[in-house]
Image (tube, coloured by chain):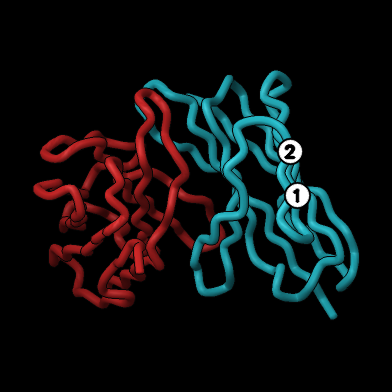
Chain colours: A red, B cyan
Amino acid sequence: DGGITQSPKYLFRKEGQNVTLSCEQNLNHDAMYWYRQDPGQGLRLIYYSQIVNDFQKGDIAEGYSVSREKKESFPLTVTSAQKNPTAFYLCASSILFGAFTGELFFGEGSRLTVL
Amino acid sequence: GIQVEQSPPDLILQEGANSTLRCNFSDSVNNLQWFHQNPWGQLINLFYIPSGTKQNGRLSATTVATERYSLLYISSSQTTDSGVYFCAVDSGGYQKVTFGTGTKLQVIP
């Protein structure tokens, strides 16, 4: 089935450790995105990528890093510099129509808890 | 950047009731989507609606781009409609999508 796969679904880490969240899509979408959601809050954009080997910072990029070496994959690393890493992380992808973003599709999310 | 506000922030309905959720945005947009986030956190696509009206079963949506708002109608609500409803807009520029503040809906039996 076509879709977006995030792993792991749940992750526990000690403070000060870097963690990497995986996001893979088989929809042949150009663009991929990472969002962060805190309890009772909306979604905030961390990073996005329109094409392989290129990505842009979103609104809350500090303490995070990404790579886009393949069209299908957009992993997110939560570094020890992120002050409040405990959150729900959502990956998404979409087609691009020139300057316009097509319909956005999401994975099931990864819940990160830092102890 | 663009501001996206949703109202009401919270809504409690009796099962079978109808409701209207609103999404206001501060600038012109290229497209608009409505999502339902279920209690497990999954975001489910409801409508991709830059303008006009669409219907899908008990749900329908209308976007009036010139007046910078969109409405989501839920008729004959069911307990499974509970969750948070988000609108999201693409205002172009950096080709990123901005999410609204959300409406938390609780449907009680």
In this view, the residue farthest toward the bottom is B109
The residue under label 2 is B53
**Alpha-carbon neighbours of circle 1 within 10 Å: few (<14), some, or many (≥20)?**
some
Q: Is circle 2 on the same chain as circle 1?
A: yes
| Front residue of this view, candidates B27 and A93 | A93
Q: What residue type is labelled 2?
A: Thr
Which quadrant of the view contains residue A7?
bottom left
Label for residue A16? none
The residue under label 1 is B60
For image coordinates 37% across by 52% down, the residue present is A92
Number of disc labels: 2
For image coordinates 57% across by 30% down, the residue present is B3
Question: Where A37 falls versus A19 (above or below)?
Answer: above
Q: Mark 2 lies on which chain?
A: B
For image coordinates 53% across by 35% down, the residue present is B89
Q: What residue type is labelled 1?
A: Ser
| Front residue of this view, candidates A16 and B96 | B96
| Front residue of this view, candidates A61 and B50 | B50
Which quadrant of the view contains residue B57?
bottom right
**Alpha-carbon neighbours of circle 2 within 10 Å: few (<14), some, or many (≥20)?**
some
Q: In which quarter of the image is the C terminus of chain B?
A: bottom right
Tell which circle, 2 or 1, labels the residue nearer the N-terminal end. Answer: 2
CB under 8 Å between discs 2 and 1: yes
Residue A27 is situated, as x and y percent measured from the top left of the image, at 32, 54
Label 2 to label 1: alpha-carbon separation: 7 Å
Label 1: state its secondary structure: strand
Residue A49 is situated, as x and y percent measured from the top left of the image, at 24, 39
Q: Is residue B62 visible?
A: yes
Residue A43 is situated, as x and y percent measured from the top left of the image, at 47, 50
Residue B47 is situated, as x and y percent measured from the top left of the image, at 61, 48
